[in-house]
Image (tube, coloured by chain):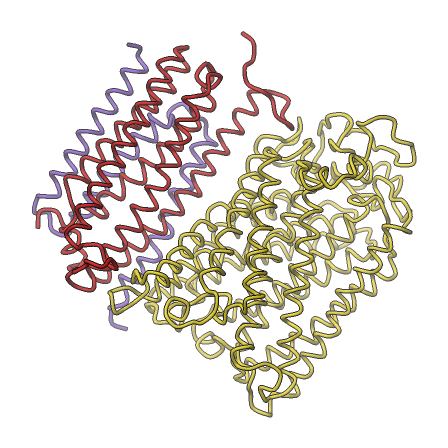
Amino acid sequence: MIAAAIDVEREPEDVEHTSYLRAGYSLRSWFFTTDHKRIAILYLFSISFFFAIGGVAAALIRLDLLTPAPDLLSNEGYNRAFSLHGIIMVWFFLIPSIPNTFGNFLIPLMIGARDLAFPRLNLLSWYIYIFAGLLTLAVVLGGGVDTGWTFYTPLTTMYANGMVVMTVIAVFISGFSTILTGLNFIVTIHKLRAPGMTWGRLPLFVWSHYAVSLIFVLATPVLAVTLLLVAAERLFGIGVFDPSLGGDPLLFQHLFWFYSHPAVYIMVLPAMGVMSELITSAAHKQIFGYWFVAFASLAIAVIGFLVWGHHMFVSGQSIYASAVFSFLSLAVAVPSAIKVYNWTATLYKGDIDLSAPLLFAMGFIVLFVAGGLTGLMLAMLAIDVHVHDTYFVVAHFHYIMVGGTVTAFFGALHYWWPKITGRMYHEGLARIAAITILVGFNLTFFPQFVLGYRGMPRRYHVYPEEFQVLHVLSSAGAGLLAFGYLMPLFYLVWSLFRGSLAPANPWGATGLEWTTSSPPPKHNFTEQPVVERGPYHYPLKHPASRGHG
Amino acid sequence: MAEQRALHEPFHEAERQEEADRLGMLVFLGSEAMLFGGIFAVAMALRLLHPQDYIAASSQMKLWHGTLNTAVLLTSSLMAALAVEAARGGSPRWAGRALWSAVALGLLFLGIKGHEYWLEYREGAIPGLANAHVGSAFEQLFMNLYCAATGLHALHLIGGMVLLAIAALKRSAREDRQAVLIGNVALYWHLVDLVWVFLYPTLYLAGAGQ
Amino acid sequence: MTAGVLRLLLVWLALMLLLAATLGAAFLPLGAAKPWIGYVLAAGKAGLILWFFMDMRGEGGLMRLATGAALLWILFMLCLIGADYLTRAMPG
């Protein structure tokens, strides 16, 4: 039998039952911790900090775009603003967001282990990330770069002013944090599953993180060597990307996008893992097509490595290579679509609880489908020729990364908040936040599809008068969206002081993490769990504490 | 026999921990392979763009230094493998000797490489330096690629040598019949060798026989 | 000398012979096949190193899969980047 749930109302009797939050209060016990749960919280604070900084950059952009004239920022200033926004959001927020907070916290719990395989490596990953983040902040204070987050050559290697070398070094360093995290997850999932936890009994959240870890380990090193080459080219003029010496600027794009396309799957796969958990839990129902969803994660990870040329359709890449990349880009949509069908089918005839996490999940599905369909459009050569480098592309990727990943992040934050903190948040306010975010998001980014289709280029802050109405709508939406994102900050923090104590299993969900106390003890379980059933064995015989507080 | 390996959290069983350590090293090697994969992609792209220039530039390379270094590194890999074999067979002193031989051969590799760089420097073949008088633009690019690739490799080689030395100095590692640390360090060293095995034809052989 | 040590020495000998063959082949007039021969021989050396020195011979499926995956991914990268450079000059 799965280990009995610990009733949190009982006073902790000994160390084995003491919550991980109470196992030491000193700074040392936090900053030298090897407990994956504490490291997850360290990451939660750090990524929230960088989200705020990236958000400030976004605010500058959207404010400047309220008017067609370049009246807020200079041209150079605007370039630096969107570069900062991209660099911070991609590497210091989105990529670590779900894996390093929820992956770190939940993977050992979900597989019935006491920690990750290499706890000290986990802490090192955080410190590497922080060091890289501090370097990036130094760059920001020093004026930043104007190259865009994509660092295209020859701008970066020959012409850009600004702290290009320091920036690429900061990103290079952050890559090691990623690689070590992926290594840790892969070994943990292979070697630390509880007795009886076969691959077919793993929660789909774990499958997603396994797939993501493959990308972490295989893609990130290519970014590392590419950034080294950019630095070498800029500092020493080695010529790899310089046609006058026989090099090729397109070579940079190949190497950069070989990493950066899989990077977007790094951003979305964990979000999909969250979806599988939120939806089965809210519907109190077995996932529809478990193995389809599991293998779809792997398929996305693998095929995702073969599509990068779709970023280069108009760059001078061979038309034959472009055709191959176009076909493969259409193919990669299939496993994603399979997941969406399966989540929807899971909801069908489920015993549905319209909680805030489910509202976030439903928002994800709507926005991810919109983003995914427009991705298919972009994968087609004939369409991409017209909308490449316009706001159509900007809207597409924000639908996936913000509408998808950030929404899933907030859904996860709410869903596992009771487990992580031992407190229940205010459900009414959370539902309002979820809806505000959904409305604000659409108001911000839907006009951008229209803008792009009608010809508004990306990375410009000067535009024809006729586009102003759409830009104003978008900026207004951004304000609403920001408000929606700020709301949880207030009621979640408030819940830490005044929220009701969370039972072990407030959602009546399956999964080993719900069999231990909220918050869990330092070593996760008081007895080694033994698994005898699949991961979504609804309906639960004893939903017990289902319902709030 | 008493267990000599310390169990770390969160492992309960030594065997599981050893498997995890080895898998971890292999996964890490996979990431290192992808790092060098980028370098090979650059070489391939340049060769496809300028096939004749590439061959001409490669023919300037010091073929005997490269070939000798390949032999040295292959032999040093043998030493690392013998170290593992010795540890497993219960001969910690031979394990130590094999490890130090691997380190020595690594130093020999660096010596030959250094001599090669010095000759190239003296000939003015290294671009960017004060005395450079390299031929065509592409020759400069090729030399830069050669410096970048072999430099990156040498960094990893030095790292590997440090690991070999650590394993050689730790008595518990040499006496471990499962050869966990020595085995993982040897894996890293073999990767350094593997990268060179492919760098050799890429840089040195394209222009041989011209 | 144990069987294990002998095996490793024989592998080393094979590697030296392959190295000699690689060097020799570089001087033969093989035309367009030349780079391929060099890499095939390098792959042969790599196979020996992986199978015997890195003990893939004694490992289970998981380790071999992990090793194979890295090799496969490098091939993905080289093949698709190569596809661009090889077909750029083609008409159409």
Task: In the rendered view, tell whether residue A277 sits above or below residue A160.
Answer: above
Quarter of the image for residue A213 reads: top right
Quadrant in which the N terminus of chain A appears: top right
Residue A8 seen:
yes
Task: In the rendered view, tell whether residue C81 sits above or below residue B109.
Answer: below
Q: Position of residue A38 (x, y in %)?
A: 71, 41
Q: Position of residue A204 (x, y in %)?
A: 65, 44
| Furthest residue toward bottom | A465
Q: Which chain is yellow?
A: A
Quarter of the image for residue A347 reads: bottom right
Q: Which chain is red?
A: B
Could you say which is closer to the camera, residue B154 or residue B14?
A: B154
Q: Position of residue A297 (x, y in %)?
A: 57, 49
Q: Is A66 positioned to the left or the right of B87 in the image?
A: right
| Furthest residue toward front | B130
Give me the residue at 16% from left, 48% from top.
B61
Give me the residue at 70% from left, 74% from top.
A478
Q: Position of residue A441 (x, y in %)?
A: 70, 71
Give me the residue at 73% from left, 28% from top.
A529
Q: Is C5 positioned to the left or the right of A227 in the image?
A: left
Q: Which chain is purple?
A: C
